[in-house]
Each structure stands twice: as C-alpha cells, then as structure tokens.
Amino acid sequence: MNRSGLMWRLASFAVAAAVVALWQWIADSRLVSPVFLPGPDRAWASLVRGFTVGDLWEKVVGTLEHMAYGWLAASIAGIALGAMIGSSHRMRTYVAPSLEFLRPLPVSAIIPVAIALFGLTQGMALFVIAFGAVWPIMLATVHGFAAVEPRLYEVARSLHLSRAAVIFKIALPSASPDIVAGMRLSLTVALILSVVCEMLAGLDGLGHWVLLSARAFRSADLFAGVILLGMIGYITALAMNFAEARLLAWRTVRH
Amino acid sequence: MTSERAKAFILPLVLLGALEIWARVVHLQSDSLAPPSAILQALGQALADGSILAATRDTLFAAFVGLVVGGVIGLILGIAFGIFETLDRLMEVTVEAIRPIPSVALLPIALIALGFGYRMEIAIVAFACVWPMLILSRAAVRDIEPRLMEVARVLRLSPGQSVRSIVIPAALPRIFVAGRLAAGIALIVAVTVEIAINPLGLGASIMLAQQALRPDLMLAYLVWIGLLGYALNAVLMAAQRHLFGYAAVVEEPS
Amino acid sequence: MTAAASSTSADLVVPSSAQISFNAVTLDLGGKTIIENLTLNVSPGEFLCIVGASGCGKTTALRLAAGLYQPTSGAVRFDGQQMTHPRREIAIVFQDYGKALLPWRTAAGNIALALEATRVPKAERADRIATLLGKVGLPNHAEKYPGEMSGGMQQRLQIARCLAQEPKALLMDEPFGALDAMTRQGLQDELLALVATNNATVVFVTHDLDEAIYLGDRVIGLLPHPGRIGIELAIDLPRPRDQLVTREHPEFLRLRRMLFDFIKATEH
C-alpha cells in the first residue's frame, strides 16, 4: 500500500479508536445501564478471562466446527449438483425454475423440520447449516456452468478432450468466479445458521454462550461473545478474499 | 415459450405426486413428514381461521418497520459516504469492524435490552438492513456520472439541492435494487429471529406446530413462508421493471 | 481458371490424392438449405481460400469440413474416412480468438491444452511450447494471460495452439477479420511462412478478396442461398508472395477483377 493509503488507514484506525473511547465514556457515565452496555474495558476483561481460565476457546472452536462441516458439505454437494444441472440444457429447463422459486425462501424455516427429524442435536445443526449453505453455491454453479463459452466446447471437441477433461479443464475453471462468489455467500449463511442452531439446541458454541450470558445478565461476557462472532465473520471473509485472489488471479490482469 | 414455462412445473408436480402416493401407500405416521394433501388441508384451515394471516401480519410488520429504519439509516450513511470520500475513508475501519457481526449474534443483547416482542425484532432487522443499503447506495452514488456533479457545481446548487435534484434521481435505480435486496434480507432475518426466540409471527407459529407434533401444519407454514418470500420478490421485481425498466441495473451479491 | 459449376452426380469416385473431399454435400439447418450439392476436393498441402458474400455458407462449409456439423446428405471425407466428428489432425482457428482461448491459463498453458490432449509426455511439453511460441512470434509471452495480450497476439496464440496439435489440415474461419490492416498483413506473411515449413493443408475462409488471392493456391467463390460453388480460380502467382510486389502483379489484378465481378453479381 502506498504512503497516502497507509496514512488513511491509520486515520481510520484512529477514528475507530475514538468510537471505542466514546463507548467507554458512555459506559462509565452510566448513560446506559451497565447491565445492558458494559464498557470496552469489561468486555476486554471478559475476553481475557474467557481465554485464560475459561473455556471460551472451546466455544469458538465449536462454532467454527459447525460452520466448517456444514459449509464444506454444502460446497461439495452444491458444486456437484450445480455442475450436473448447469451442464445439461435439459436439466436446466426442468430443474432450474424450481430452484429459482426456492431461492428467496428463508432457509431458517427449515429448522423446525430439522428438529422434527433429528431432535435438538448436532445432526440437526449440520443438516440445517448444510441445507442453508448449499443454495448460494448450487445456484451460482448452475449459472457458471450454463454460461461457459460455447466456443470452448468446440475447441474441446476438436481436441478430442475426454468428458472428465472438459469438466475439469474447461467448465469448472470457467465457472470458478461464480462458484467462489457463491461460496463466499454460503460462508455468511453458515455462520448465521450455526449461531441460531447453537442457540436453539444448546450446542457448544458462541451462539449458546451469548444466549446464556444474556439470560444470566452477564453483559460483559455477552459482548465478548458478540465481538468474537464478528471476528469470525471478518476473518473468514478475509480468508475467502485471499483464496479468491490466488485462484482468480487471471481475472484481475487487464490488457 | 409457454411450453418452456409448462415444463418448469413438471418436476415439482411429479415430486409432489410421488410423495403423496408414497405417503398413502406407507400409511405415513410421522412427526416430521406429512403427505402433500394433508399439508394443503392444514394450510386451508389455517387460512380460514385467520391464524396464518395474523402471523403473517406480525412478521411483515416487524420486517417492514425494521427495513425502513435500517434502510433509511443505511441510505443516509451510504449517500454521505458516497459523496464525501474523506468521511468514507475515515469510517472504513469502524464499518468493516461492525459489519461482519451476524445480526443474530445481537439477538441476546436486544433481548435483555428490549425484551420479547416487536421492538427487539425490529432492532435486529434494522441492523441487518443497514449494511446492504449502505454498501450499495454508496456504490450507486460513487458511480454517478461525474459530469452531473459538475453541473451541480456550475449551477451553484446547495448541498441539499444537489442531493435532492441530482444525486438521488441519478442513483435511484440502483438504490431501489438495494432496497429490494434489503427487503428480502428483512423477511429472512425476521423469520429467523422468530424461530430462534421471539414468540410472535410466522417463525413462532412454525416452531409451535413442530412442538405440537403437527407436521402437516408445520410444513404448511413452511410452504406459506416460501410463497411469501417468492411473492415479495416478484412484486418488487415487477415494480423495479415498471419504474426503472430503462436502467440496466446490475445486482451485486452482498 | 475455370468458372466451373458444381458437379451434380453423386460421384463416388474420390480422387485418391484428395485430403479433404466434399461429395454432393447438402446441409439443412433450421428449415433452410444452407449448402446444396457441394462437391469439392482439397489436395494435401494445398492452400484453398473460400470467399463469398455474407450468408453464402462459407463458414458453414468450413464447419462441415471440421466435423462440427454433419451433412444432411452426401459425405465429407478426410483422408478417405468419413467425418462424423472432429478429428485431432484437423485444427480449427476461429475468428473470435478471445472466446477460443482459455482466459485462466497463460499462453504456455493454452498451448499445453493441445499437448495434454494429444498426450505429449510432460518432459517434452516445455520445449514444444517454446518452439511454437517462437514460430508465431511470441517468444517472451509464455507467462502472459490472454487478457493481457492484444488481438493480434491472441490470434497468434490460437494459431500456436492449433499447430501444437500437429495438424494435417488447418481450417481457418476469417481469422484476421477482427484485426487492423497492418496486423492483418503481418499475420498473412507469418501464416504463409509457417505453412511453408509445415506443408499443412489450409482451408481459409475470408470475405477479403485481396487476402484470398494473396494467400491461396486456389480460390473458390460460393453463391448464396443455398451455398454452392460459383467460381473457381487457380492462383498462378509466384511464391513466396510479397505484400507489395505480388499485389501489383498484373495476374493478381486480373484475378481480383474476376472475383470482384463475381461477388458483385451474387449480391443482386
């Protein structure tokens, strides 16, 4: 980053620090009851406590695990199904409209069905997270495969590429920008559904942690948990950005 | 054309028919599944006795108010950040720190601060709606043809006049798209909050149906929620095309 | 130098020296007859140019020769064998080069695609890629992406990829049509040089009459609706061709006039 960019970054951090200071001031002057709004100092203390003597780290891992398993399962299923549907014109005519109809459906509505099927268990959570996360990836993959440049298929025919080669060397790379965008969206969905499932089923994770803290009016612990959830959201998005930049380096080069 | 559209219905009709037949043959006795005919019946009943409509009204009310509150805040901030680049750069870290927090994570805070009911749900929905409105309206303002801004300067328009007569009309198509996306998010978040904890609206109803071991009613609510989401999106898309058909709007996945 | 009409009989005696042969080929697409009763023989190593007004079916004829289309009746043969699907020995150079290259692979990667398809052992690939890039005048561009290259460079890359197939025949569909005049002339000469060393058969479709005469050993003009041969000219100009000298040759001008009149006549 060049020098002026760096200066702006620092200034922006300064503004953020000022916001935190403002928060501290509001908490100290008791403008809002400390039961609802702990100061950043107490939230920080709770974080430290949670990681040193408490089991906050296990909660973080718990949420990350729920996200990861669901998201990975969804990615594999979503890409495979999306590839199948997207590469066949016939499938697209019959299946794609139903998928489009289901697109605006609030996926959290599947939770009671999952509870009916699996009870308040890890299995339920995995099902819900995977189900919710599959849609953005599958829909994006269908779109990506449907949009492969037909000329490339002719090149493939001319070269006598095998079916597998066409999928892995031509269709998949061509669809990868769409697929990555879908995976990024799915990650957000996975985090949200992890939190909700943990809250509902009392599974080990940050979602359950923040709910318990709220019920016991431990606002510092509550805020610590919320901050951690924000950090998970931030870091996973950052990781996706990084992966995308590596995978899709060819897109950014412009003539 | 029409045959293409007709083909779209084949798969769902076949699936539903197969499910119906299977459920009948197997004499389905389950807490989690019900034959499509029973689902339809439960849906009809819930419509007739008004329960589903009351719940829909509650959910839509919370979603709508949350959308307006969050949308307006997001819009104002988005326009401000779009026009004043300095402000945008200074606020960047703060925005990027708060944005990734999943709205449901704030649920317990809203719970202890506001208790159960409309207010906490509206608060969560509003938080969720701020971000897409902010990001997309900021982008819309930034992409305004610079020529138009020069016109505003030449005409010596006051900031308020510039915003009213130039910025908003020029950015309106994309702002509308942002609003449409935010509306979808509002519905999803409202239902999610209700399912997670709030005892009102469609989310609460579907959870109650599951707890009462009424799979037909539960799935009826699921179908209804799906229809609601679809209808909302369809109505807004139609409005968008009607109002801004000429504008080539590009959707941005948030 | 004969303005020959197409032969009508289903002449099954294929001249054994023909590499590509069309035998009374008819193609109907979407209810229209695009090509009717086309009989055509291309000798090995020959450079054949096909010209014609828009919509006369010259691209369609090329795609039939490539095996991308199947004739409704009649047969297209390559080396005596009927073409039911594309063959690796026939390389196709498309006009929209941007769409025919893989944007996510570098120049080297794009050429490698052909080498992977023809199962060239990994150890040999780097050498071959370097040689081919040198041949098409892109020696230092192995690691560039198509998105970073100009139109002329991309078309050269496509040609390099086609040469990597070690084709017996090169089918080219208005390959220089989207390029500016100077780039086009440079590529014309490069193509002639490449073909001289490889001795490949070339079928070159173009709407540029000058280009057709400059490049070809023989030029065929198609009549439209449906496509059939309207004129056939043997090009008796000395090789190697030269952009200035050849184009001022009296024979060049005479052939040019004949083709020009032919095209004008077909446009009515």
Image: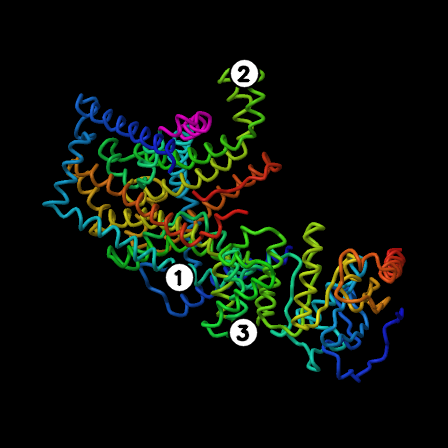
The disc at residue B245 is none
Residue designated by label 2: B157
Residue B93: image quadrant is: top left
Give the image quarter of residue B134. Answer: top left
Subunit bearing disc 1: A
Residue C198 at x, y = what percent?
65, 72
Q: Secondary structure at mark 2?
A: loop
Residue at 68 percent of width and 73 percent of height: C199
On whether residue B82 falls in the magenta region, the answer is: yes
Q: Main secondary structure of the magenta part?
A: helix
Mark 3: secondary structure:
loop
Q: Nearer the viewer, residue A223 or B223?
A: A223
Callout 2, which amino acid?
Leu
Nearer mark to the viewer, of 1 and 3: 3
Mark 3 is surrounded, within 10 Å at the Cα level, by few (under 14), some (14 to 19) or many (20 or more) other residues, namely some
Task: Please give the residue where the numbered disc 1 appears in the rendered image.
Answer: A77
Amino acid type at image mark 1: Ala
Q: For residue C209, say whether it is visible.
A: no
Residue B243 inside the magenta-drawn segment: no
For label 3, the residue is C118
Residue B196 shows in this picture: yes
Q: On what subunit does the disc labeled 2 rest?
A: B
Marks 2/3: CA–CA distance: 68 Å
Up/down of C248 relative to B55, above or below: below
Q: Position of residue A86 (x, y in %)?
A: 51, 60
Three-letter code for the amino acid on which mark 3 is drawn:
Thr
Span of residues in magenta: B73-90
Tell me the mark number nearer the camera, choosing from 1 and 2. 2
Q: Secondary structure at mark 1?
A: helix
